Amino acid sequence: MSAPAATQPAVAHHEPSKFHFYVQIAMILAVITGVEVVLVYLPLPKSLVIGTLITLSAVKFMFVIFYFMHLRWDKLFCTILFFIGLILAGFTMFALLHLFGADASKPLSAAAIQSVASFTGIA
Amino acid sequence: MAEALAKSSFTGTRHAPAKTFDLFPRPTTKTGLIGWLTTVDHKKIGMLYGGFAIMFFLIGGIEALMIRTQLIVPNNHFVSAQLYNELFTMHGTTMIFLAVMPLNAAFFNLLVPIQIGARDVAFPRLNTFSLWVWVVGAILLNIGWLSHFVPAWKFGGAPSMGWFGYAPLTSRAFTPQLSTDLWVFGLQVLGVSSIVASLNFIVTIINMRAPGLTMMRLPVFTWMALVTSFLLILALPAIAIALLEVMFDRNFGTNFFEVSGGGQPILWQHLFWVFGHPEVYILILPPMGYVSEILPTFARKPLFGYPIVVFSGVAIGFIGFGVWSHHMFTTGMGTIATAAFSIATMAIAVPTGVKIFNWIGTLWGGRIVTRVPMMFALGFIWMFMMGGMSGIMHAAAPADAQQQDSYFVIAHFHYVLIGGSTFGLLAAIHFWFPKFFGRMVPELWGKVSFWLIFVGFNCTFFPMHFLGLNGMPRRTWTYDSNMGWNAGNLFASCGAYLLGIGIFTYFAVLVYSFFKGKKCGNDPWDGRTLEWSIPSPPPEHNFASIPKVHARDAFWYEKTNKEEIAKEKAELIKDEESHGGIHMPDQSWYPFFSAVGLLIGTYNMAQIHLPVMFGGKEILSSHMALAITGGVILLLSCYLWALEGPAGYHIHLDADGNPTDSHGGHY
Amino acid sequence: MSSHAATGHIDHHHDHTTSTGIPNKKLLWWAFLASDCMFFGALISTHLVYRLNPPPGNANPTQVFNIELTSFSTFILLMSSLLMALAVNAIQKGNIKSTRLMLLGTMFFGCIFLGGQVFEFGHFVHQKHMTLSNSIFGSTFYTLTGTHGTHVAIGVLLLGMMYVRTFKPAAGGGFLLNFVHLAAICVVMGVSFIFVVPGLIEVIYGHGFGEFLGEKAKPLIVGAIGAITLFILSRQRGEVDFGEKNAIDIETIGLYWHFVDIVWIIIFTAVYLLEYL
């Protein structure tokens, strides 16, 4: 009960409408998705494309959680709560990909075919 | 509070006339079978958790004694090799998921709402749901035992691939038995139960604290309950995925862990330990909480370095997610990964050590009263530290390569799980027994059981350090007499019997005290936290008025400022009555019904491809229809649950504090 | 009747009865979503781990995928998120009519996404011969996207329940009608994502429209009956026990829906787009 009275302004009956605001955000998201799809076909260096794709996805992600999911207008604790899970999941994924990407973890069958196959994966 | 309960829940028609969406009339009886099946009272739920857990604790103990009997002499044939595998698998699974975890859940339920000055958890019906879902999981795990008694039930005996279920042992080729499928579903269901319960406790602890109870005034046990809840919701999804993949491998022909189809069994180990390592902190953090409550009470001193103890708990929880691969040092992960996980494992010993020093600091200069709970708590510190010492030896990867899969590891984790978790739990049961049953446990018999357990435990597990270093592998059915392991095993088995006698004495004394123990008042130990301020056993509504918390040891402050508190309490009670009385949540059938649906659904889903047999004849070609029936029952119950709303009733206290209930139209 | 109706306004970002000011339900859902992050983290890891070192005989993703359709599905899911946000916006202003419309729209877009997935899975299995069990790529891909699809389907079901809930009469009763209404919603949504949407996608790819009507006649008729029932039931008048006070319920379902959307944002990049490099 952290002093609720002080943080209670005399707000009007209704929230101000965020209709146009939401529509604009959705347009931005749609445009980013379009850019992503086009990007993979452009003749750019692979590392640059991967970096851009990850950044763009992160931007979309943040737009959705902070605006559509109103984290921006909610108590900070909601953001902290969600980011605990997000960060732990991120670290776990990072660690697992490194563990399986290490030379010591390469299955022999895969290592053998890698020299001939034309696979150009995420590694 | 009343407002909080009513407003925060599903906003159906509150106190509207009875004409609502009800298929069944809402149960109102508080006693008898219906009362217990439909209860939403956190104290009753806690007792049910505790009762079931103690039952499984004893079953797991019998399994352990059978294992030790098999190993008492070389080349023994007390049990068959297959039964031995079933015994060690179910001993591990039972003790972790069906004994220690639910005993901790019992204490979360019993204590957390009272320690934070609330009348129930944030979502009372969800709490009931967690309990019955847990029971469903327990049934699925243990149902395989029945084939040993009724050969017509073809479960193929209990699961037999170890509690870790390493791939490819879980593939159809190696364990075709139905009980393995049921084990997969059982663990999945237990995971659902734990996640739901943990979400409930996170919301309860963060949102339902009494006025004045800031986070840094929370009792340490409640803090540890919060950290444990976070560990549960973040660790269990990993094993949920792993179990899902095994289920697909076994039933739908996928290749996640099938080498022939391109899968890598090592992935199971990683996913399992991503869950499994936080799990060991899930088992030990709540006992650390009990001990942090018990030591100050019997050392007559506040806890030394409260903030550091809390932060250490949080740090252990967080670092606990980054050390899982130390269970896999010998799998060949490459030097960088091995070094990184080795360092992280050594780092996690730091906050653990900090806690030990703080407990010693609490004892230092205190006036120590050696009552039974204190004996167990002191035993905890010493034994847990010994387990920690051998733990830090495993952190060094080269040394671990020698110890891997030997009895040294068995010794290590029994020192932390019995000497740590179980000692903590036994201390807690003794400490809070008077609060919830209103009777004291006889001191002499408590001490007798403590010494039997303490000596028996050390006799059992200390020799295992040497057995392990002499090369005795774990999960071994029997051994030759020329290996030099004879004396150690004989000694350990005799110790195990002593430990068994100790545990039996402990619970026999509890049963005796339940009927014949000396009656006690509100505060038999001169306690420091809020649960000691209310009657023993606590009334349904816990508090006549929601307390105002003025200091970290809330009840200690109340005892030292009696006049101020008495005046404040009278005002608060009057105030609450003027707002319509004490609001309590209504009971409900639907959590129980949805658990029944889940049981039918998962039991049949696990054997989906098999024909349904009845009286020796095939009556359905697959279990699909039955599985869907279960699913529909589950879904419908959940929907009706939502429609029914939390509703609730009011309790009014008369001048002597005696409650009367009133249902319906208040506003 | 309601305690906050008396005070005249509802603050949608603050609940004065809890210690932190965050409503209990919102806190529960955020904690659940944190947990779900780990859930999808483990699933996506499984998929990517097996992409690092593909075994011999694995399916070749770029030959299997249909990136135009997936991009369209992604766009649809994003737009459904917009409608969901608008539904929350509407109920916070107490506009029930608009809330219902937005809920229906969200469900409808969700069904288009699911229908796209049904088509995609059928296409992969029958034309590209990639099944759940004949390669590790199939195993991980179908499990990952299938689990996500299940999340979307549960979301549609929850939205359907919430939509029906908005008709709960203030006078009480209506128990049976409520179930008919819910059944109608389930039938319409089920038919649309299992039959209609995949069928129409096939029409776009050159299948005859008449043949589509002929082959799917039975489910189409059932769906039509469901749709008519839905239309009739949506014209119920009379005071309902639903309004601005229920904003938190719609908002929490919204949180779930948006979360499913952001998971797809990651899957779209990690599972589909990166394969084209």
Image (cartoon, rainbow, N blue to C red):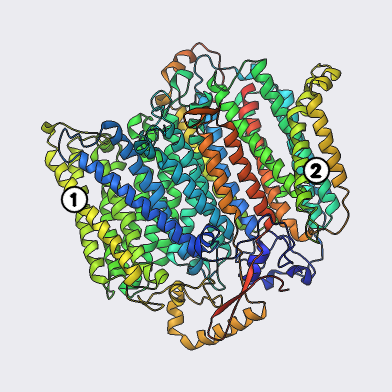
Nearest the camera: B222 or B630?
B630
Residue C43 image offset from top left, x and y in percent: 55, 34
Q: Quadrant of the C terminus of chain B?
A: bottom right
Q: Amino acid at mark 2?
A: Leu
Chain letter, disc 2 residue = C
Residue C125 image offset from top left, x and y in percent: 64, 19
Residue where numbered disc 2 is placed: C104
Q: Which mark is residue B264?
A: none
Give the residue at x 54% y 49%. Answer: A84
Residues at marks 1 and 2, CA–CA distance in whole angstroms? 67 Å
Question: How many neighbours does mark 2 have within 10 angstroms: few (below 14), some (14-19), or many (20 or more)?
Answer: many
**Residue B569 shown left or right of residue A66 in the figure:** left
Q: Which mark is residue B495?
A: 1
Residue B467 image-quadrant placement: top left
Q: Amino acid at mark 1?
A: Gly
Residue A62: in sight, yes or no? no
Question: How many neighbours does mark 1 have within 10 angstroms: few (below 14), some (14-19), or many (20 or more)?
Answer: many
Residue B380 image offset from top left, x and y in percent: 29, 59
Give the residue at x 74% y 31%. Answer: C193
**Residue B564 shown left or right of residue B449 in the figure:** right
